[in-house]
Image (spheres, rainbow, N blue to C red):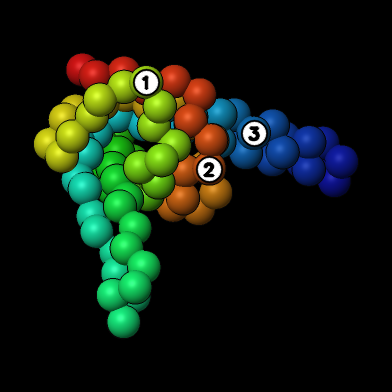
Amino acid sequence: MFRILLMAISIFLSVSVAAEDFIVGKLEEVTVEDKSFSKVEHLFLIKDEVSGNYFFLDKKKIKGLSVKHGDRISIDAEYEGSQIVEVRHISLL
């Protein structure tokens, strides 16, 4: 019985994680600087319209598509926590 319960929980978790692979929302560009202003990073912040979660995306990971602050996009991505680590596909909506 315990095995069945564990299997059911693992299937439920794998299905729920896979459902959140697509993130749809508006882009916000964020500039992050260190205290001495020697290092500046440009990140995109995306608020998913479905879950309400925020995701951070390094601007360097977007290749071949010109996106800007305020664009509504759909992104197929792999993420850890709130950080997008791999972009599979991105499109403007």
Question: Disc 3 residue type?
Answer: Ser
**Residue at coordinates 30% horizontally, 52% vertically from top-left?**
42
Q: How crowded is mark 1: few (under 14 residues within 10 Å), some or many (20 or more)?
A: few
Q: Which amino acid does label 2 sit on?
A: Val
- How far apart in space, not on screen, are marks 2 and 3 (Cα)? 18 Å
Mark found first going from the N terminus, 1 or 3: 3
Label 2 neighbour load within 10 Å: few <14, some 14-19, many 20+: some
Element at badge 2?
A: strand
**Coordinates of residue 64 in the picture (x, y in percent):** 37, 20
Would you say the residues marked 2 and 3 are in contact, meaning their CB atoms lie under 8 Å apart? Answer: no
Mark 2 vs mark 1, foreground winner is 1
What's the distance in space between the residues labelled 2 and 1, CA to CA?
17 Å
**Dot 2 or dot 3, earlier in sequence:** 3
Q: Residue at x 18, y 34 (%)?
A: 68
- Does 89 sit left or right of 7 as displayed? left
Q: Position of residue 80 (x, y in %)?
A: 55, 49
Q: Badge 1 is on which residue?
A: 64
Q: Quadrant where the C terminus lies? A: top left
Question: Vertical placement of 31 versus 3: above or below?
Answer: below
Residue corresponding to mark 3: 14
Distance from Cα at disc 1 to Cα at disc 3: 31 Å
Q: Is residue 32 visible?
A: yes
**Circle nearer the N terminus (2, 1):** 1
Residue that numbered label 2 is attached to? 85
- Residue 25 figure quarter: top left
